Image (spheres, rainbow, N blue to C red):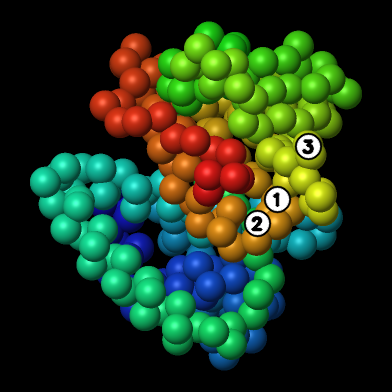
């Protein structure tokens, strides 16, 4: 936590995070151009943010794309914002966001990808099982993720309220147990104008008794879905982390990740 506060204490690093919040997944060159900053200076600041886990670097070919990672800030919120304070702060936040919407009417409409990183004290095999076992996903997600998890197979995100309704479905694109799983993520089989499904990649990187879990959600159809998953993934993965490390899920309602409810 000390490294997070140290990273956030510098105004230049906060500005870098602001620029990634506005447009995620930028290269070093793009960040330097937007901030009129020398590459060496930007690299030094980004290294501090990466060490604090506030920025995640994803390689795409020869490019290194930088993504804002909200996990440490989410942990600060969970630690210091009580249930009593949260409703009042949500009202303030809603007012601010409404004002920002009016101010950003002419802003670019492109929707960035979403990347979330968390560290879990567990084995890669345990994390893989938590991602692919229907009973376990029902515990921490509130939906059972059902599939045989073979490349080309279908998967379903089923409610566990007795209705067996499928809120999200998709196809398994890649599977490399226990380190990599790629799936499509869709909710509209009968839509009049079906959209191309988004794609979720789970990357499990073990190191001794710690696992780094990176979730990348790409090809988002709109900013509404981005807003929904930006709240949904931290809640789901915090529950997964708590279940594996303590055996208990967090005292909060399971998050509905279906785009229709985002």
SS at badge 2? loop
Marks 2 & 1, CB-CB < 8 Å contact: yes
Q: How far apart are the alpha carbons under marks 2 and 3? A: 23 Å
Give the distance between the C-alpha atoms of the residues marked 2 and 1, in whole angstroms: 5 Å
Disc 1: which residue: 218
Q: Is residue 214 visible?
A: no
Q: Tag count in the figure? A: 3
Local crowd size for mark 1, using a 10 Å CA cut-off: few (<14), some (14–19), many (≥20)? some
Q: Which residue is mark 3?
A: 189
Local crowd at mark 3 within 10 Å, few (<14), some, or many (≥20)? few
Element marked by disc 1: strand
Q: Is residue 121 left or right of residue 193?
A: left
Q: Residue furthest bottom?
A: 36
Contact, mark 1 vs mark 3 (Cβ under 8 Å): no
Mark 1 or 3, closer to the camera = 3
From the viewer's perspective, tell me whether residue 258 is left or right of residue 200: left
Q: What kind of element bears circle 3? A: loop
Q: Give the residue drawn at x 47%, y 25%.
A: 141
Task: Name the residue beneath numbered marker 2.
Answer: 113
Q: Residue at coordinates 38% horizontally, 18% vertically from top-left?
A: 243
- Place of residue 33 in the rendered image (x, y in percent of width and height, measured from the top left): 64, 86
Measure the alpha-carbon separation of dots 1 and 3: 19 Å
């Amino acid at each position: 936590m000390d490294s997070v506060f140290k990273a956030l204490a510098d105004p230049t690093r906060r500005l870098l995070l602001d620029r990634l919040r506005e447009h995620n997944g930028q290269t070093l060159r793009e960040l330097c151009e937007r901030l009129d900053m020398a590459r060496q200076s930007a690299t030094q600041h980004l290294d501090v943010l990466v060490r604090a886990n506030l920025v995640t670097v994803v390689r795409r070919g020869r490019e290194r794309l930088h993504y804002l990672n909200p996990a440490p800030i989410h942990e600060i919120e969970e630690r210091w914002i009580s249930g009593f304070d949260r409703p009042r702060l949500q009202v303030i936040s809603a007012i601010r966001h409404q004002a920002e919407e009016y101010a950003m009417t002419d802003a670019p409409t492109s929707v960035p990808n979403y990347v979330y990183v968390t560290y879990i004290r567990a084995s890669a095999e345990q994390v893989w099982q938590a991602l692919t076992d229907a009973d376990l996903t029902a515990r921490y997600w509130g939906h059972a993720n059902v599939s045989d998890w073979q490349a080309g197979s279908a998967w379903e995100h089923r409610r566990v309220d007795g209705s067996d309704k499928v809120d999200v479905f998709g196809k398994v694109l890649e599977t490399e147990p226990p380190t990599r799983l790629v799936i499509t993520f869709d909710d509209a089989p009968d839509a009049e104008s079906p959209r191309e499904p988004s794609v979720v990649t789970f990357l499990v990187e073990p190191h001794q008794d710690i696992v780094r879990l990176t979730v990348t959600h790409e090809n988002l159809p709109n900013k509404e879905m981005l807003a929904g998953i930006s709240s949904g993934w931290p809640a789901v993965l915090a529950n997964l982390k708590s279940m594996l490390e303590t055996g208990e899920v967090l005292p909060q309602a399971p998050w509905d990740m279906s785009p229709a409810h985002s």
